[in-house]
Image (tube, rainbow, N blue to C red):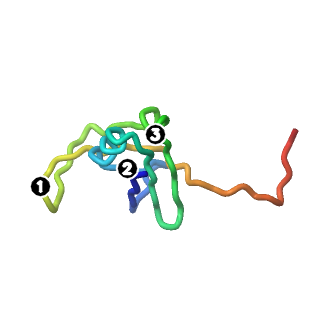
Amino acid sequence: MIKVRVDKIFLGKVSVRDYIYKKALRKKESLGIEHGKEFMFIPYDKLKKAKQYTKDTFKSKFNGKDYKLVDFDWKPYKEENVDQGRLL
């Protein structure tokens, strides 16, 4: 699994750089996105369905490479409440 830490959630979406997304596809691995103490897991088979590319290209401050952002709907993992019953 490839893990990424993001700082912002904007309109219910988190953004990951395109080279990280492509790396997960190339290695056929899932993508783990962390924001604060919450975590979201996107399995490899759902990785292609969950994306939206931005049209803008950005330049890295550190190495000068260009990249785009890939947006995912933020749905953090939540454990089931064992005290709550289930409907049949």
Secondary structure state at the residue bearing disc 1 = loop
Between 24 and 18, the one nearer to me in the picture? 24
* Quadrant in which the C terminus appears: top right
Residue 69: x and y in percent read 30, 45
Disc 2 marks which amino acid? Ser
| Residue drawn at x 49%, y 36% as measured from the top left | 46
* Residue occupied by mark 1: 64
Q: Nearer the viewer, mark 3 or mark 2?
A: 3
In the image, residue 62 sits, relative to residue 52, either above or below, namely: below
Is 3 situated left or right of 55 in this image?
right
Q: Residues within 10 Å of mark 3 (few under 14, many from 20)?
A: some
Q: Which labelled disc corresponds to residue 44?
A: 3
Disc 1 marks which amino acid? Gly
Q: Residues within 10 Å of mark 1 (few under 14, many from 20)?
A: few
Residue 3: x and y in percent read 40, 56
Label 2, label 1: how far apart the Cα atoms are: 19 Å
Label 3, label 1: how far apart the Cα atoms are: 29 Å
| Residue drawn at x 20%, y 49% as measured from the top left | 58
Q: Earlier in the sequence, mark 3 or mark 1?
A: 3
| Residue drawn at x 53%, y 62% as measured from the top left | 38
| Residue drawn at x 31%, y 48% as measured from the top left | 20
Is 85 situated left or right of 41 in this image?
right
